[in-house]
Amino acid sequence: MSKFKYNNILLTGAAGALGKQLRKTLSQNCNLLKISDKEKLQKKFENEEVNLADLSSAEAMIHLTKNIDCVVHMGGQSIEGSWNNVLNSNIIGMYNLYEGCRKNNVKRVIWASSVHTVGFYPRSEVIDSKVTPRPDSNYGLSKVFGESLAQYYWDKYKIETVSVRIYSCLAEPKDHRILSTWLSYDDLRSLILASINSSNVQHSIIFGVSNNDSVLIDNKYAKHIGYKPKDNAEEFRSLIEKKDGFIDSSDPLVTTHGGYFASSGHFDD
Ligand SMILES: NC(=O)c1ccc[n+]([C@@H]2O[C@H](COP(=O)([O-])OP(=O)(O)OC[C@H]3O[C@@H](n4cnc5c(N)ncnc54)[C@H](O)[C@@H]3O)[C@@H](O)[C@H]2O)c1
């Protein structure tokens, strides 16, 4: 019997900021780690297999998901962008990926959704994962589509998904908003591993934040995943206040969960 929950894992977006943070941990937790991106990648760990693939190609996604048990999906347009980019990478790309999973009997997907699915909630409101989505951008809208797609593929085809609504995943918090939205790299790795190893997730939505003193979310509906964050953005407060001064509570950066994504205009204008 294998010591791993899933023998073969696919990591998309492996050339990106978060993909890079996950390669070592994932390679240590499976037999085969397929890594893919539309950008060039170098093999780094013994059990990695490198694949160049664009999410917008249905054919490429069917090929990529062959012989895979679990997908960690970090690929895609990762900030607000033109409608065309968002459509191709996050909407068509997400559909292509799940169709590949369905055709190749992939059991579970763990993917990076976003704070921007709920970006218009005021910062004064602590939200749980059952609130109605309030996307703040084309990008946020595409992530809402992704979460609905995940629910549909669970209900209809029994592919399990953990949608991780990542708030701000960075090495260190860099401004006032991130004091409440920070997800450290260590906590990201532990969240992804918990999502892989949890026994029954159906379609679960979990907020990806660290153990920050300043709290905007309540993960009460995701306790079964067993994620235990350790880091706390508070230790960076004095540095941020020294750098940026105190912030006015009416600054758009801190009036909503989504920050400047919620206050900026249409990307294509
Ligand atoms: N970093 C954060 O704080 C944060 C917050 C919320 C959500 N997320 C989500 O997490 C995921 C990873 O974020 P990141 O910060 O590493 O972003 P990133 O931009 O550094 O990485 C994304 C990767 O996806 C690849 N990609 C983009 N379009 C593609 C396509 N059509 N086909 C194949 N590959 C494609 C890019 O080449 C890139 O390597 C993204 O889905 C992003 O939306 C990140």
Image (tube, rainbow, N blue to C red):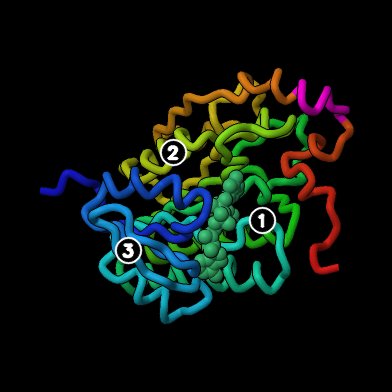
Q: Report x, y in % for residue 136.
A: 75, 52
| Residue 61 horizontal side relative to residue 254, left or right | left
What amino acid type is highlighted by mark number 2?
Answer: Leu
Does the residue tagged 1 have its C-beta within 8 Å of any atom of ligand 1? yes
Q: Is residue 6 visible?
A: yes
In front here: 158 or 124?
124
- The magenta-colored residue range is 241-249
Q: CA distance from mark 2 to mark 1?
A: 21 Å
- Which sits earlier in the primary sequence, circle 3 or circle 1? 1
Residues marked 3 and 1 touching at CB (< 8 Å): no
Locate the C terminus by quadrant.
bottom right
Q: What mark, if any, has residue 106 been given in the picture?
A: 3
* Residue pictured at 48% horizontal, 53% vertical: 111
- Which sits earlier in the primary sequence, circle 3 or circle 2? 3
* Residue pictured at 61% horizontal, 34% vertical: 182
In front here: 67 or 200?
67
> Label 2: which residue?
191
Q: CA distance from mark 3 to mark 1?
A: 27 Å
